[in-house]
Image (tube, rainbow, N blue to C red):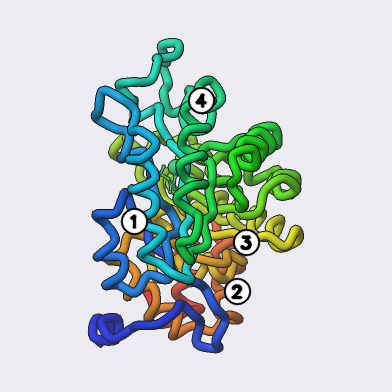
Amino acid sequence: ARAAAAARSTGPGRTADGHAVPLLANIGGPKDLPAALENGAEGVGLYRTEFLFLDRADAPGHDEQVAAYRAVLEAFPGGRVVVRTLDAGADKPLEFLPAGEPEPNPALGERGLRMMRRLPRTLDAQLSALAEAGRDTGAYLQVMAPMVTDVADAEWFAAAAAKTGIQHAGVMIEVPAAALRARHIADHVDFFSIGTNDLTQYTCAADRETAGLGRFQDPWQPAVLDLVAASAASAADAGRSCGVCGEAAADPLLACVLAGLGVTSLSMGAPALPLVRAALARAELAQCRAAAEAARAARSPEAARAAAAERLPGLA
Ligand code: PEP
Ligand code: MG
């Protein structure tokens, strides 16, 4: 019955009592657009642009980048498209970029925005292509940086974006330091998007690429939920939006908990959209908040999930 309800679920994301939680798609490029549209995505919450840069001898040129970004923006007239700037390094080395120092711990090394701070021309070229692609498409373009760690990172990225004509710059919150200082980071950017994959990895100090670390790779860890709550509260205080674009958003029960923690939109792989839409439609916001509070009060990820399931019956 639930699968049938999910298959029928269409329209924008909202709770049973009508609180809007836009449901967006994570994509790796224009090839992922058909699935996003078929599953009713209201926009794109995470465009992982690194796929355009991987496995090639040269950086993509200006026109190639503009075309790849424009194709996505044009698919969502009136919708939102959140593009993430190049997240290279760690598990995603780029052949054409000059290597930095050898790294014994790449996940703790020069990845994401850190690499772009060493290679600002690569970032500027991408931002310029994005600014051009964003003109007159009817979509609302937001551009965010990965692996932002502190206020200085956020300020630096916001300045680079403004200089190239990007109007809406934001940051991913995926490093615990950024979550803890979100209040101050919010002074410099328009929006947050929480990356629960890396936020879990860095909060629990458990490599996301290593199999078998079990409960330390679980976004239901109450410590992770606390950091999501802190980020969402800081965003709300500053009048900023705060989405989630990690895998956690694709778990229907956790998606409701995230909404209850104050997250304002959810972005996920397209196949998860119908189930998450159906789950939200069955839960009232007050129930989501009660489930979120109970999950944060739990002592383990299993207990957090069980406590949430009790307050959102039928969703687990
Ligand atoms: C994340 O870290 O949660 C995220 C969405 O980014 P990626 O999985 O691409 O690192
Ligand atoms: Mg990440």
Left or right, residue 207 beside residue 228: left
Question: Looking at the image, is mark 4 or mark 3 nearer the viewer?
Answer: 4
Q: Position of residue 137 (x, y in %)?
A: 45, 62
Q: Is residue 145 visible?
A: yes
Q: Earlier in the sequence, mark 4 or mark 3?
A: 4
Instruction: State the CA–CA distance, disc 4 to disc 1.
Output: 24 Å
- Residue behind label 2 places its C-beta within 8 angstroms of ligand 1: no
Say what amino acid the circle numbered 3 marks.
Answer: Ser
Q: Earlier in the sequence, mark 2 or mark 1?
A: 1
Q: Earlier in the sequence, mark 4 or mark 1?
A: 1
* Kind of element beneath mark 2: helix
Left or right, residue 201 beside residue 92: right
Say what amino acid the circle numbered 2 marks.
Answer: Arg
Other residues around mark 4 within 10 Å, as few (<14) / some (14–19) / many (≥20): few
Question: Looking at the image, is mark 1 or mark 3 nearer the viewer?
Answer: 1
The quarter of the rendered structure image containing the C terminus is bottom left
Q: Residue 289: give its label.
A: 2
For label 1, the residue is 71
Are the residues flagged by discs 2 and 3 in contact, CB closer than 8 Å?
Answer: no
Other residues around mark 2 within 10 Å, as few (<14) / some (14–19) / many (≥20): many
Of 53 and 18, which appears nearest the observer? 53
Other residues around mark 3 within 10 Å, as few (<14) / some (14–19) / many (≥20): some
**Which residue: 25% across, 65% down?**
35
Are the residues flagged by discs 1 and 3 in contact, CB closer than 8 Å?
Answer: no
For label 4, the residue is 121
**Which residue: 54% across, 69% down?**
259
The quarter of the rendered structure image containing the N terminus is bottom left
* Kind of element beneath mark 4: helix
Q: Position of residue 46 (x, y in %)?
A: 43, 53
**Which residue: 75% across, 48% down?**
187
Say what amino acid the circle numbered 4 marks.
Answer: Arg
Of 249 and 146, which appears nearest the observer? 146
